[in-house]
Image (spheres, rainbow, N blue to C red):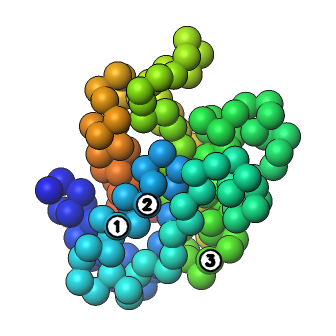
Amino acid sequence: MIAQELAARLLKAATARGQKVATAESCTGGMVGAAITDIAGSSAVFDRGFLTYSNAAKQEMLGVEAATLEAHGAVSEEAAREMAAGALARSKADLAVAITGIAGPGGSEHKPEGRVCFALAQTGAPTHSETTDFGPLGRHEVRQFSVQNALMLLIEALETGEP
């Protein structure tokens, strides 16, 4: 329910500013795009979504560098920034959000379950990235919180000009 409310708020903010959004998703598997397109009228602001679960998809569809994945891994702010920048460059959107993480089960000492990296790319602004450790809440909860966080990044950028 929270995602629906956030998606409606996003649509209102993007419509008011005449801006379009794109998504680049890994661990959320298209859930951010689904939340947005669940709202009637979303076609006015949602340009496209990239579902890039594999490293090959991240590279082929978004231009994520192999060197970035090798040096930092797919679950990193570096990869998230390249995903967001790639989505922005390969769409007609004004801002793009990217999500990559470990929803669980599993993880490692260095990248635990519940760690999710986000990035927001906007036309004419530096790309913002952040990492959130949701903890081992379980796959469903980590993904739900990730969707909410991604929507909030887009909303904040539209409402305040900053993520």
Give the image location of residue 37, x and y in percent. 33, 75
Q: Residue at x 64, y 49 (%)?
A: 54
The residue where tag 3 is placed is 91
Quadrant of the rendered structure where residue 2 is?
bottom left
The residue where tag 2 is placed is 30
Separation (CA) of disc 1 from disc 3: 17 Å
Give the image location of residue 146, x and y in percent. 37, 44
Give the image location of residue 69, x and y in percent. 75, 39
Q: Is residue 49 visible?
A: yes
Which SS class for mark 3? loop
Residue density around tag 2, few if under 14, some if 14–19, many if 20 or more, within 10 Å: some
Q: Are marks 1 and 2 in contact (CB under 8 Å)?
A: yes
- Outermost left residue: 1
Where 110 falls versus 92 (above or below)? above
Q: Are marks 2 and 3 in contact (CB under 8 Å)?
A: no
**The residue under label 2 is which amino acid type?**
Gly
Give the image location of residue 52, x and y in percent. 60, 56
**Res. 34 mark:** 1
Separation (CA) of disc 1 from disc 2: 6 Å
Q: Is residue 59 left or right of residue 160?
A: right
Which SS class for mark 2? loop
- Outermost top residue: 109
Residue density around tag 1, few if under 14, some if 14–19, many if 20 or more, within 10 Å: some
- Numbered disc in front, either 2 or 3: 2
